[in-house]
Image (cartoon, grey):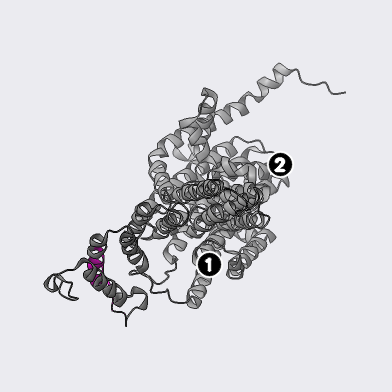
Amino acid sequence: MNAASRDPLRFSFRRVGVLAEHAFREAVRQRVFQFTTLLAALLVAGSLGLRELDFGGAELRFVADFGHGALVLFGSVLTIVTTVQLLGGELESRTVLPVLARPVRRSEFICGKFLGVWAVVLVFCAVVTVLLLGALWLRVQSLPPPLPDAPRAQAVVAPYAGVLVVGALQAVKFGLLAAIVLLVGSYSQSTLFAQASSFLVLGICHLQYLARDAWQTGHGWLERLGGGLIGLVFPNFQLFGGEYLIAGSGGPEPLLVARVAFYGLAYTTMFLALAVWSFRRREI
Amino acid sequence: MRRAMPWPTAVLRSLPALARAVAVVAVLAGVGMALRPLEAPAWAAQVRQQPALEWRSVEGAMGQGLSLGLLGGFRALAADLLWLRANAAWERCDPVATTAALQLVAAVDPRSVAFWLNGARMIGYDMAFWRLEALGGETALPAAVVRHVTEAQARAAIAHVEKAFVHHPDDPLLHIEIANFLLLKLDDLPAAAEHYRLAALQPTAPFYAARVYAELLRKQGRDRAAYEWLVALHPTLPPERENLYAMADTVLGRIRELEEKLALAPSARYQPGSK
């Protein structure tokens, strides 16, 4: 038996690229991308006006927090809805059949969808981060100089590096979320179920640290076991939040950022591999 | 009519899907264990910079809108809205609702020093007045009752500010706030002076903290200590023509007053620029 008969269709990055490009174009044309990007941009711009509502925090931190809130909220919605529509929509409408009838591996199909969604999310993150940097710069220009009432009265410095790093980490997190949604979508029989389950998983991942706490300090064995299992199975999305990266006086720590990024990419690879494995066993 | 599948058959048929799910969970648990060495230090660093949200303590009290806001990342905005809630309760002179809202604000966003300071002022000054009014008014009450209520609220306010040191260990304003409660409500001059001293030692301390510490030493009759403190302070201050807030000339004037009071010999007196 020669190699060709054992493996008639080798994995092709070129085909993955074509599928990803197609998925990207389809996703960009969807209203959800335009809608979430517009809303996030409006919120970031609005944060300059909403600072009237800021009673406690420094103004720049409020603007940065608000921008990140927009990035996290609408980025999560965009990632889940786009991924479910691209995969679940094709499965429900059976348009996946003519694609898979061609010489395309299922793993290529999943990887193509993933890369297409991730590219869309990267564009979203880039747009919102640039707008946020602009909003911060505008605010810095209008701030009065600090009162010299202390020996070390310092001029206000905007957390530009922190904002950039958090934007990049959020992009990594959305890639991980897209891989999780693909795994959920590879199981589920309807787009509604896939979307509901994905939002549920998003909530669990954001509160994963509570499960870790229950594992370490829980009272009964059931609480500890349940907490331990949830804490191990689901990634900790709070790590990508990044408020602590901005809050640090010395700017983001490169080693810390690298750890979080590697953590996200490793989980993404694993979830993507499981999604491929699950999709290959699925009856279409 | 189609007959329902017997349950043993249904269970057997779902076994492959169940096995797949179990396999996925097992693999993810393995990945979680393998990535734990990456996650733990990053999480520890994050909690050090900004303690994780005490979700269980705030979730029930906030309502769905604010809970979703927090999950979505709008932590600062959620804290601002809760601060509005605290102010609404404060306008109604409702100590229970105000305290609850202040605790929520602190749990949601402990990064803002202003929330801690203003919350402590509500507890220490306003709530004491509300409680005395509820009992019949300060003028109608025995002095012992007035003192008891005033001191109890001042201690509650100090306890509130002390919680903020976890998040702002180097902030001089927290020490100054505690010192003011000790000074104005508890008449504890030595403790107040000590907090002003701690405030003056912080890197971002305002100039006045060091001057007030010296004044509090003088009020305790510790003129020698006040003199030595001011003599050490004066060379670190910028000239008054460069920075009015530093009040270098005022500090020098107080040094001269203390020299007179301590009857120091002319040779032992402080000479600006000599150190």
Q: Which residue bears the numbered disc 1? A: A132
Q: Position of residue A248 (x, y in %)?
A: 40, 57
**Toward which corner of the image does residue B180 lie, by quadrant?**
bottom left
Tag in front: 2 or 1 = 1
Tally of marks = 2
Left or right? Give the position of B140 relative to B143. Answer: right
Which residue is farthest bottom? B241
C-beta proximity under 8 Å, tags 2 and 1: no
User: What chain does mark 1 sit on?
Assistant: A
Question: Does residue B68 show up?
Answer: no
Question: Looking at the image, which residue is at 55% across and 57% down?
Answer: B76
Question: Does residue A71 show up?
Answer: yes
Q: Nearer the viewer, residue A223 or A281?
A: A223
Q: Which residues are magenta?
A: B229-240
Find the distance from the CA under tag 2 to the CA under tag 1: 37 Å
Left or right? Give the position of A275 relative to B274. Answer: right
Q: Amino acid at mark 2?
A: Ser
The correct choice, above or below, for A208 with respect to A226 in the image is: below
Provide the major secondary structure of the magenta segment: helix
Q: Which residue bears the numbered disc 2? A: A190
